[in-house]
Image (tube, rainbow, N blue to C red):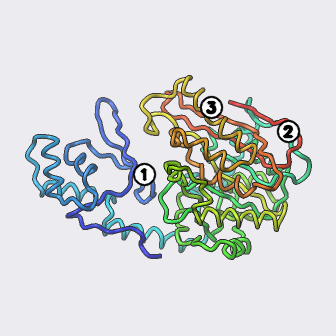
Amino acid sequence: MTYPFPVYPLETPAMRPLEIIPVQDQGRQFLLVRDPMGVLPGMAALPPDPIIIAILQHADGTNDVARIAEEARNLSGMIITADKVRHVVKEMDGALLFFSDAFRDTWQARQDEYRKLPVRPFRCFESTDRLLMMKTLGDEFRRHKMGRNSPPEKLPLPAGNSVRAILAPHIDYKRGGETYAWAYQAIEQHTRADTYIVLGTLHRPASHLFIATDKNYDTPFGPVETDHAMLEELKALYPHELMAEDYLHADEHTIELQAVYLKKVLGDRPFKILPILVGSIDDYLVLNPPVVPHEVDEELSAMIKALRTLLQKHGEKVVLIGGVDMAHCGPEFGDQQPNTEEIERAIRQQDESALAHVESVNATGFYDTFRPSMNERKVCSIAPIYTVLAALEGMDLKGHRLNYHQANSPDRNTMVTFASVAFAPDKPASRIILTG
């Protein structure tokens, strides 16, 4: 595909959108750089010296190195030449931090490499020993069924193939295992679908809101086949670009973790998936007067209509899955203070407000809960949850909330919240909640 970003000469460098995290370790300070686009392997560490700070603040493609050197002199009171800034810019370009020729070439090579692969490889499991991975994951999934918040042997959901959609976490299995178990027990016991349409949260910038791939998803338990016939049906219903950025599936974990769980719990039962990554609709939160997202976003409106058509046409043979998390709070996510018990309670209250609209299958009500704070608690999956809810509206379903959990790190610097929900007819009337 055509390279979609501008290229700037290093004489007027332009920083890419990167996450910059100040870190202090054993008295030393440095800046940790994380790449939301996934092109930079791992993380880079930068010293917080005046030249680096001036580049981070002023390298926007309009300021040349002479201007950046002047800003560095103003910051430090030191003699800093344009040649010194050029040297640092060149070193940073080696780490692919700018929209430059080097970044464009690396980006293009990554996309070409992905498109040549026969399947989308699994990324969340590092061992090359597949048998060892299968054993390790088998042990892990058994643990998910043995915790104090694990699901009962039989879920009190309507009998038969009643579940038309679920929301499951996309956090790692260690923290989210019991919540995954609730969601996928609903899949195992209350669906017999041929195809699971998986909407995974996209954590990186993209030119389009929805991105599908035609590659099968490999897992340690074997590949999960993509439903190419269903993909063609979706393309016929959805009049916008759907495949141009499919390379974004390569490093995004949110669908992979659903594919692995599906493969494990369904075993030899034949099924396929239709994997679709979903970007962000947070920008609509700032508009005044407020708007209903799918009334102003053509891609969102078209996808909701297309998914609803597929669900209605194929009935219980198609089930919708959202791979979604909720709040991200604490210094690790840019907040000023650790997650105290008071903050935990406040986040739970806000999550409960949003989940009430999930239970009533009310997409607009769900979205509106984020307006007062402009999504201050950094819920990453607003768009896929909204899409699921809007696609299900009018189908006489209820969101049966199965489990909600807050995973807070021991130092309280990193908290992620998530839930599992099964969408089925409104019987039984009582909802199931186990909170951790």
**Earlier residue among tags 2 and 3:** 2
Q: Which mark is residue 42?
A: 1
In the rendered image, the vertical position of residue 409 relative to residue 2, given as above or below? above
Give residue 286's position: percent from left, percent from top.
49, 48
Q: Depth check: give the residue in front, 322 or 262.
A: 322
Tell me if label 1 and label 2 are in contact, CB under 8 Å: no
In the rendered image, the vertical position of residue 379 relative to residue 250, given as above or below? above
Judged from this view, the residue extending furthest toward the left is 79
**Earlier residue among tags 1 and 2:** 1
Crowd band around label 1 with a 10 angstrom C-alpha radius: few (<14), some (14–19), many (20+): few
Q: Secondary structure at mark 1?
A: loop
Q: Secondary structure at mark 2?
A: loop
Crowd band around label 2 with a 10 angstrom C-alpha radius: few (<14), some (14–19), many (20+): few
Q: Which mark is residue 348?
A: 3
Asked whether, in this view, residue 290 is left or right of residue 305, the answer is: left
Q: Amino acid at mark 1?
A: Gly
Q: Depth check: give the residue in front, 362 or 106.
A: 362
**Earlier residue among tags 3 and 1:** 1
Answer with the quarter of the image where residue 88 lies. Answer: bottom left
Q: Amino acid at mark 3?
A: Arg
Q: Which mark is residue 69?
A: none
CA distance separating discs 1 and 2:
41 Å
CA distance separating discs 3 and 1:
32 Å
Q: Amino acid at mark 2?
A: Glu
* Residue matched to label 2: 153
Of tags 2 and 3, the one toward the viewer is 3
**Residue at image x 76%, y 53%?**
165
Crowd band around label 3 with a 10 angstrom C-alpha radius: few (<14), some (14–19), many (20+): some
Can I make out residue 139 in this image? no
In the rendered image, the vertical position of residue 15 relative to residue 46, given as above or below? below
